[in-house]
Amino acid sequence: MMDKLPSDQPPGTVPKLGEIGLTNFAPYLMNRIMGRYNASLRDEMAGLGLTTPKMRALAVLSVIEGPLIRELAVFSVVEQSTLSRALDQLAIEGLIRREADAADSRATRVYITEAGRASFETLWPHMSEAHSRMFRGVSADERRAFVGTLQKMLSNIRKHEI
Amino acid sequence: MMDKLPSDQPPGTVPKLGEIGLTNFAPYLMNRIMGRYNASLRDEMAGLGLTTPKMRALAVLSVIEGPLIRELAVFSVVEQSTLSRALDQLAIEGLIRREADAADSRATRVYITEAGRASFETLWPHMSEAHSRMFRGVSADERRAFVGTLQKMLSNIRKHEI
DNA sequence: CAGTGATATTTGCAAATGCATTTAAATCTG
DNA sequence: CAGATTTAAATGCATTTGCAAATATCACTG
């Protein structure tokens, strides 16, 4: 189970995945974990008529007020064309509202409605619970450090993004 | 940027996402990071005629010898039906080989071929580079701790899984 | 200020996805 | 050990996805 952990690479060499070990390779672990996390929410969402893109948009909108659609796409990690269609549905269901930007008439800002907020708040306890389950047996300090590393990683990968 | 970090919940209360802050919520950060990581590989993969499911299967097979298809589905975080079709393609391209299990004739084991290994080894440097970029400015100790936490999380979420 | 290029969003369409079902074989049960 | 149940993998099919193109507007440049 505990192979050797990835260390700094000897110059000019790229250690193979087999040498690192699947269960020591962070992206692998993260994909595994998020795959499960997202799958576990899918059922709850289905019951509320939500899909992953719709839920993600609502989640972000519950926190960020009136972003542009392209910003929302980045924050919610959904392709813009997919998001566009998800917003169509959310709008029909009265969970969000599109509003033309005052300064730029190409742009659209998105606002969550009260119904949208209510819908997300029905889902949130399940998300929160999945989150707690994920961190079972991880101390507050360790969690803090973990989130701190994630924040560094995010700033590393978003090049010229928001 | 640095809101307060999630702490242990007061009994009987679930803090809202807005209170935690999007950028302190680990699943959000992880989805963001993996979204970028996976997207950055998609281009490289496209050039090699690979899709995400095909690449993931190859990656796992480069490390695990002859898993059952349902095991491979778990390890590679791909729906079984999607994997089945990805394997069809990989087999046509000669990158993997399906072999009936000796003991259970319902089951199929999957093996990577030399060509498959070669194909993955063409992609691997890009994955490795994306990985390094992700961890830029994160010390070896911090990485170790991070991976350690991920391993705990994985064992928390996989209930009765492999 | 007309023309060229960039940007915001939507939409057409082919391909990918995932649920539910099917097929086949193993295992359990009375 | 026949019949019912579970399990492994593949497949049918409707939905979703994402790329590329279209549309509309803005910003820049000579």
Image (cartoon, coloured by chain):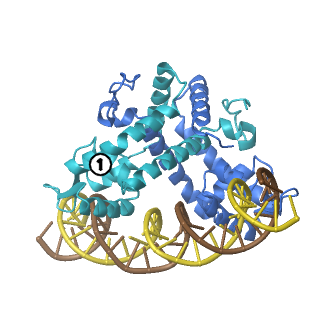
Chain colours: A blue, B cyan, C yellow, D brown
Mark 1 chain: B
Q: Of C23 and A133, which appears nearest the observer?
A: C23
**Looking at the picture, does residue B92 appear above or below residue A137?**
below
Image position of B63 with respect to B42: above or below: above
Residue at 31%, 46% in the rendered image = B120
Q: Which residue is mark 1?
A: B119
Q: As drawn, is A65 to the left or to the right of B44?
A: right
Q: Quadrant of the N terminus of chain A?
A: top left
Instruction: Judge whether D26 appears above or below B19 on screen.
Output: below
**Residue B110 image point, x, y percent:** 23, 53
Estimate the x, y position of residue B85 in percent, counting from the top left: 34, 64
Nearer the observer, A121 or D9: D9
Callout 1 amino acid: Ser
Q: Could you say where residue A66 lies in the image, as x and y percent from the top left?
A: 80, 53
Whether residue A122 is visible to the viewer of this picture, yes or no, is no
Would residue B5 be seen by someone viewing this image from the given angle?
A: yes
Quarter assignment of residue B11: top right
Q: Residues within 10 Å of mark 1 (few under 14, many from 20)?
A: some
Q: Is residue B119 above or below residue A9?
A: below
On-image quarter of the C terminus of chain A:
top right
SS assignment at label 1 = helix
Q: How many numbered circles are shown?
A: 1
Q: Residue at x 26, y 43 (%)?
A: B64
Which residue is at the front of the view, B55 or B76? B55
Q: Is residue A104 left or right of residue B46?
A: right
Residue A91: x and y in percent read 75, 67
Q: Residue at x 48, y 25 (%)?
A: B143
Looking at the image, residue B23 sits to the left or right of residue C26; the answer is right
